[in-house]
Image (cartoon, coloured by chain):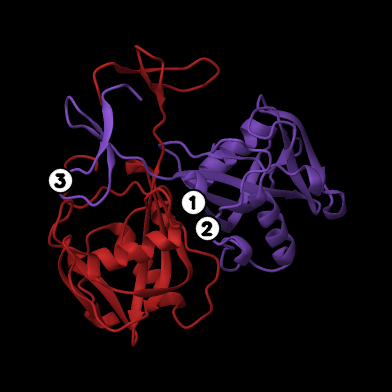
Chain colours: A purple, B red
Amino acid sequence: MAGHFHRVIPEGEDRERLTCADCGFVNYENPKIVTGAVVVEHGRILLCRRAIPPRTGFWTLPAGFMELGETVAEGAAREAFEEAQARIAIEGVLAVYSIARIGQVQILFRAHLAEPGIAPGPESLETRFFAWDEIPWGDIAFPSVHWALRHWHATRDAPLGAPATNPPEDTRGMTPLPGATTSV
Amino acid sequence: MAGHFHRVIPEGEDRERLTCADCGFVNYENPKIVTGAVVVEHGRILLCRRAIPPRTGFWTLPAGFMELGETVAEGAAREAFEEAQARIAIEGVLAVYSIARIGQVQILFRAHLAEPGIAPGPESLETRFFAWDEIPWGDIAFPSVHWALRHWHATRDAPLGAPATNPPEDTRGMTPLPGATTSV
């Protein structure tokens, strides 16, 4: 952020905002949405091995920051294509996780592959479908990937119900990122 | 935004970003989350009459922009207190709407009043519980309030299922805000 921004409480508000000392512009900082999917083909789950930080080399679901001008579902489909060149069909919302520590809300869909074929995009080293008992649990990138996989598995044969939210052991998404030295 | 920001495609990206010409800082602009709730007491629904633009004087659900450092559910509870001085108990996610036209995702919960008593906060002219057949349909502030009320009503006696998403007639949230002359 340019040097003229500082944190003050604007008139009529109750908390500090990043405000330009010159023109009074208030740069509201709000949580960002990560949109993604558990994508299944023949009962196996698509994971991507990350080519970029954080957690380079670890496995994750295809997911990323939602952009302006798209719906949450369109964003999840875009990310699946960017990270795994996968064309997906979205079934519905599987989970809504709040990761308060890093100002993220993750909206994850249940989906299946709509057309055959996957391949690593520029942000992935490798893309693969895993059977449940092949999932590399020790090499998963983020806690919420564990949460989403477990919830997918527990509900996989039923119609979609109420989406999962953070598990009882971590109701606010405060688990430190494994190996992280700074907040992301 | 200060004058030195312009829109360019940063190296390695595929779309324009608001970038500082002096220092290269990229100000990512992403959709914002509105969090709120359908709050019920004795089968009646809490609505707030807006004291602020847009749609001053029209009725809406208690909802507002999610802040950093809170979960989605915490944000919905905070907004219910700020706008209606209501203490609420959240049951689960009722709806996830994408309003692509204005870069919003609305996450709305099913909730009930946890302690008796409501009163207008500074952003409300009036707060009231409405029976279903008393709802002032012609004076509702936003299309998504219609959507959420209809979905709440259709599912009110059942356990929470998959959250509603945008209705088939408006899959991307492109309905113009009634009476709006600019995007909000």
Chain containing mark 2: A
Residue named by callout 1: A100
The local crowd at label 2, few if under 14, some if 14 to 19, many if 20 or more residues have their Cα within 10 Å, is many
- Name the residue type under label 3: Glu
Rendered image quadrant of residue B129: bottom left
- Mark 1 or 3, nearer chain start: 3
The local crowd at label 3, few if under 14, some if 14 to 19, many if 20 or more residues have their Cα within 10 Å, is few
Q: Element under label 2?
A: loop
Task: Say whether residue A126 is left or right of residue B128.
Answer: right
Q: In this rendering, do the residues under marks 1 and 3 share a single chain?
A: yes
Residue named by callout 3: A11
Question: Mark 1–mark 2 contact, CB under 8 Å?
Answer: yes
Q: Tell me the CA gap for discs 2 and 3.
A: 30 Å
Residue named by callout 2: A172
Residue at 57%, 63% in the rendered image: A163
Rendered image quadrant of residue A27: top left
Rendered image quadrant of residue A23: top left
Task: Say whether residue A59 is left or right of residue A53.
Answer: right
Task: Say whether residue A108 is left or right of residue B134.
Answer: right
The local crowd at label 1, few if under 14, some if 14 to 19, many if 20 or more residues have their Cα within 10 Å, is many
Quarter of the figure with the N terminus of chain B = top left
Chain containing mark 3: A
Q: Tell me the CA gap for discs 1 and 2.
A: 6 Å
Residue at 24%, 80% in the rendered image: B130
Q: Element under label 3?
A: loop
- Above or below residue A129? Residue B119 is below
Residue B36 in view, yes or no? no
Quarter of the figure with the C terminus of chain B = top left
Residue B8 percent coordinates (x, y): 40, 16
- Above or below residue B159? Residue B37 is above
Residue A96 percent coordinates (x, y): 54, 57
